[in-house]
Amino acid sequence: MSDNGKLTVPGAPTGHALRDAIAAKQRTAEEITRDALSAIERLEPQLRAYITMLPDRAIAKARDVDRRIARGEQVGSLAGIPTAVKDIFCVRDAVTTAGSKILERFVAPYSATVVEKLDAADAIIVGKTNMDEFAMGSSCENSAFFPTHNPWDTTRVPGGSSGGSASTVGSGAVALALGTDTGGSIREPASFCNIVGVKPTYGRVSRYGMIAFASSLDQAGPMTTDVRDAADLLEAIAGWDPMDSTSVDVPVPRYADALRTDLSSVRLGIVREFEESIAGDAAMAQLYKAAYADLAALGATFVDVSLPHAKYGLATYYLIAPAECSSNLARYDGVRYGLRKNGSGDVFSMFEQTRAAGFGPEVKRRIILGTYALCSGYYDAYYVRAQKVRTLMKQDFDAAFAACDAIACPAVSCPPFPLGAKSQDPVAMYLMDYFTIPMSLAGIPALSVPAGYVNDLPVGLQICAPIFEEARMLGIAHAYEQATQHARRRTPAAAATA
Ligand code: GLN
């Protein structure tokens, strides 16, 4: 790595290319897994994308896949593909921290449903990735352990909260990763690390075994090198789960069948309020104009749509998410999970000391905010009112989708920023999710796909669709990706040394 933070990244293999190589018997799952593990090892000193590596589990699984292929047995849809998992998902017998000191030594007694599904699809889980503590943040700097760095420029943040997953996929070390998105935590880091990140419809993917932040918003989704991989990974993890009463029993389509290469007869909504907001930054506005021109060249037509309540998105989110987190995080009391500090001997001092020592400043800020918003007397004024605004936001999207098939809009307001630039200013950090929060509040699917560069730093285009229309959304993103190939470019240093 040179002094200016530019990193030489390996060529990014896609998961489907690796799967094809295994199927054609050109490579074994074990070779591919060992390559991924050594790429991670080589890059970790600069990136710090992982909290826990699982090399033994990965090699054992890869050998099992190879054995079954050698015997001519059927293997899963992700067989032999190295996959990273955000450390918010329980993986049986592995340390699962959610980026927090309070769970530093917590060993999960069972696996999340999505992890079981990855195992059933024969993906190779290589490790658990770094994240903002309990998924609260937009830069990965709120991890209780260490910040993760951006593979495009290691002096910059990878985004958050799924920063470790974004960084390791962006570096080319692994093709697939799982993240979670409550208000933007898949889409913003995907944009910052030049990868594809998909937040599915709320209820599309099981939350069982995924450590809860804000239960009415949290959703797991794919973070991948390209759209085809995102389609395959989403298909593998989606579906109804009897263990999660908020998962929905809607059939999972073959998403790969929806991938298209032109956009004729597609009507895309352009959000008036978002365009007014991005217009203040000439370089960003220019990039998105170019993206819309590329979509038009593929045959899409545009419709002007309005999301009049989007301006209340942040205020609404920062009541609902803290309120739900204050309730969800009440369980970390020193009695049942992880850390315990004994205090002065009585149980209340044990609770206090454990939570004082175990939670970081952002988590404490949110617990205090959320507890306040839920107090009797304030509950109607804050929480109930925020829920009403949420309904209005959902109605805004319903009205917009009456006139268009999908919406194209900015994913972020800026390219990745330097480490430390916003870490002392919570509100500046909250503003990072301005373009992603409305979709989370409405529960609709949304993704970020690489859209080009501002000052040599990657920026993503957001595409969102009506509930359960992930196939349509992925199809549009695929056409755009194939026509533009923005993810293909490598960092200047990598290109120079290639
Ligand atoms: N950045 C937002 C927050 O801090 C969203 C995080 C997320 O989606 N998990 O809450």
Image: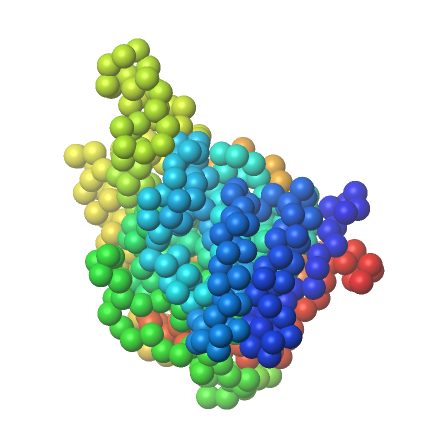
Q: Nearer the viewer, residue 110 or 72?
A: 72
Residue 55 visible to an observer of this rendering: yes
The reply, left or right, for residue 310 in relation to residue 167 is left
Residue at 23%, 37% (x, y): give it: 374
Q: Position of residue 420 (x, y in %)?
A: 60, 37
Q: x, y percentage for residue 48?
A: 60, 43
Q: In this rendered view, identify the residue nearer to me: 448 or 358.
A: 358
- Displayed quadrant of residue 25: bottom right
The residue nearer to you, when weighing 411 against 475, is 475
Residue found farthest to the right: 496
**What percent of the width, then of the height, locates residue 327?**
26, 39
Residue 474 vertical placement versus 156 (above, below)? below
Answer above or below: position of 485 versus 344.
Answer: below
Residue located 56% across and 68% down the image: 15
* Image x and y of residue 359, in percent: 40, 30
The relative height of residue 272 versus residue 153 in the rendered view (above or below) is below
Q: Nearer the viewer, residue 220 or 439?
A: 220
Q: Classify the position of the C terminus by image quarter.
A: bottom right
- Residue at far front of view: 71
Location of residue 8 by image quarter: bottom right
| Residue displayed at 44% across by 71% down | 76
Furthest-top residue in this view: 344
